[in-house]
Image (spheres, rainbow, N blue to C red):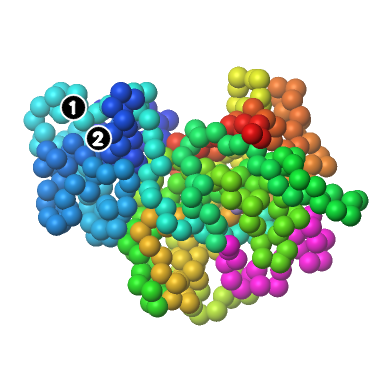
């Protein structure tokens, strides 16, 4: 499949991708939906207004692309969203003669990415963060409880998660202010209050709920994929010193509620289809309600880099892959709803930190520097235990096809000093 536009094989956004996002032009401040091809944004609100999507969107749901979020579109469900994506793809193909005057079509609907600002793509009602990497859970367990009790007894039987904070989810490029809070040093009796000294990132991905489920009606594992619209990159910023003091017995609270950053383009399950891989074997066997075919797992390369305060270049610090996760997305969704909990359009379910088996594939500074005991010595001459003010963290991710990539772009955030 080829587009009539020339796209570099290194682009994250070839015609095979067709992600969804929300943008404004730098000069008009009018949020609306977009897809992306190469270095151009496609104004979907215009495409819809001009009637090109007419037979693909139910009549009563018109103007789904003119709002400031994708919720209306995502809520239409797979049968609609999947066809609309395919339709957009068809219009961009080199063998599509439907749009006779491609020149004028181009001028009106394709906008250079540098003239656009990407916004948060979804109005997020609820946010859940899983803890689905065995390597990450084991590493953290060893650090805090020792080798013998690294994994809690429940971990291999259910996808552990906590309910996170949706209001502080921000789009890539948004600055993150160092949080203040209570911390207590091991050798002191009483807690202190002040800026977090152990500010960290977490390399994660997350998926958005398309069509939700009714309260009281669990989604079986085999139907889970019908409710998943697509994926973004996630950085779950974490204040380790606040976390350590507060987390017992109910889990993370203020250590993670100050900011969570996501990438602006939602890559659909359909685009990821060619990159499915089988999930690793699960032992012990999960209970029947969590028994999945194991095929809803993906080979997505993930890379983390840091631009240290006062420097110009990003330096890679970790390479991981989505396929390392122990629990798959269908198991996560089935488990989340098994009580009858209703997921709603736009809810975000994140994976948890995605660490691989080797020490250069760990998904947090906590693990990469082993609680700060082994600082990272960067090629630039800088060293890091945790993030310092002025540092910028970047996560990128992509699937490698034969002659193209399906990419997610990036999620970045710069640390600002406590105010
Ligand atoms: Mn997390």
User: Which type of secondary structure does the marked residue at label 2 adopt?
Assistant: strand
Magenta region, residue range: 138-162
The residue at 64%/70% (across/down) is 156
Query: Which residue is tagged 2?
Result: 43
- Find out if the beta carbon at label 1 lies less than 8 Å from the nearest ligand 1 atom: no
Q: In the rendered image, is residue 12 in sight?
A: yes
Taking the magenta stretch, the answer to whether it contains residue 127 is no
Front position in the image: 226 or 244? 244
Q: In the rendered image, is residue 222 in sight?
A: no
The image shows residue 214, relative to residue 76, as above or below, that is: below
The image shows residue 352, relative to residue 266, as above or below, that is: below
Quadrant of residue 308 within the rendered picture? top right
Residue extending farthest to the bottom is 288
The residue at 14%/24% (across/down) is 104
Taking the magenta stretch, the answer to whether it contains residue 143 is yes
Q: Position of residue 83 (x, y in %)?
A: 22, 53
272 displayed left or right of 257: left
The image shows residue 207, relative to residue 237, as above or below, that is: below
Q: Are marks 2 and 1 in contact (CB under 8 Å)?
A: yes
Q: Position of residue 241 (x, y in %)?
A: 75, 48
Query: Which residue is tagged 1?
Result: 108
Quadrant of residue 306 within the rendered picture? top right
Q: Position of residue 114 (x, y in %)?
A: 37, 23
Front position in the image: 185 or 95? 185
The residue at 70%/32% (across/down) is 388
Quadrant of residue 137 within the rendered picture? bottom right
Q: How packed is label 1: few (under 14 Cα within 10 Å), some, or many (20 or more)?
A: few
User: Which type of secondary structure does the marked residue at label 1 adopt?
Assistant: helix
> In which quadrant is the N terminus drawn?
top left
Q: How packed is label 2: few (under 14 Cα within 10 Å), some, or many (20 or more)?
A: many
- Find out if the beta carbon at label 2 lies less than 8 Å from the nearest ligand 1 atom: no
The image shows residue 339, relative to residue 171, as above or below, that is: below
């Amino acid at each position: 499949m080829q587009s009539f536009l020339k796209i570099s094989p290194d682009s994250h956004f070839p015609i095979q991708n067709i992600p969804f996002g929300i943008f404004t032009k730098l000069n008009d401040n009018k949020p609306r939906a977009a897809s992306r091809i190469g270095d151009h944004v496609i104004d979907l609100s215009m495409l819809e207004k001009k009637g090109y999507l007419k037979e693909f969107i139910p009549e009563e749901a018109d103007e789904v692309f003119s709002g400031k979020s994708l919720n209306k579109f995502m809520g239409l469900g797979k049968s609609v969203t999947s066809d609309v994506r395919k339709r957009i793809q068809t219009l961009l193909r080199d063998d599509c003669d439907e749009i006779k005057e491609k020149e004028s079509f181009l001028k009106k609907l394709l906008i250079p990415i540098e003239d656009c600002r990407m916004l948060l793509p979804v109005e997020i009602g609820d946010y859940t963060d899983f803890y689905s990497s065995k390597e990450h859970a084991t590493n953290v367990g060893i650090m805090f409880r020792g080798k013998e009790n690294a994994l809690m007894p429940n971990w291999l039987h259910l996808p552990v998660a906590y309910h996170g904070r949706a209001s502080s989810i921000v789009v890539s490029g948004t600055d993150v202010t160092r949080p203040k809070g209570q911390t207590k040093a091991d050798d002191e009796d009483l807690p202190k209050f002040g800026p977090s000294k152990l500010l960290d990132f977490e390399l994660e991905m997350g998926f958005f709920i398309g069509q939700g489920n009714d309260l009281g009606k669990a989604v079986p594992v085999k139907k889970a994929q019908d409710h998943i619209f697509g994926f973004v990159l996630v950085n779950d910023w974490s204040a380790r010193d606040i976390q350590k003091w507060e987390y017992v017995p109910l889990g993370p609270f203020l250590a993670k509620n100050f900011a969570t950053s996501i990438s602006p383009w939602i890559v659909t399950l359909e685009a990821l289809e060619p990159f499915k891989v089988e999930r690793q074997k699960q032992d012990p066997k999960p209970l029947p309600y969590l028994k999945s075919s194991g095929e809803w797992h993906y080979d997505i390369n993930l890379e983390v880099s840091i631009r240290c305060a006062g420097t110009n270049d990003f330096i890679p610090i970790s390479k991981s892959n989505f396929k390392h996760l122990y629990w798959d997305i269908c198991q996560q969704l089935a488990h989340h709803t098994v009580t009858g909990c209703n997921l709603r359009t736009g809810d975000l379910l994140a994976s948890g930190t995605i660490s691989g088996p080797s020490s250069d594939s760990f998904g947090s500074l906590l693990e990469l520097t082993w609680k700060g005991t082994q600082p990272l010595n960067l090629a630039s001459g800088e060293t890091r235990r945790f993030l310092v003010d002025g540092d910028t963290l970047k996560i990128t991710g992509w699937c490698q096809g034969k002659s193209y990539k399906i990419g997610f772009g990036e999620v970045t955030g710069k640390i600002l000093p406590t105010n």
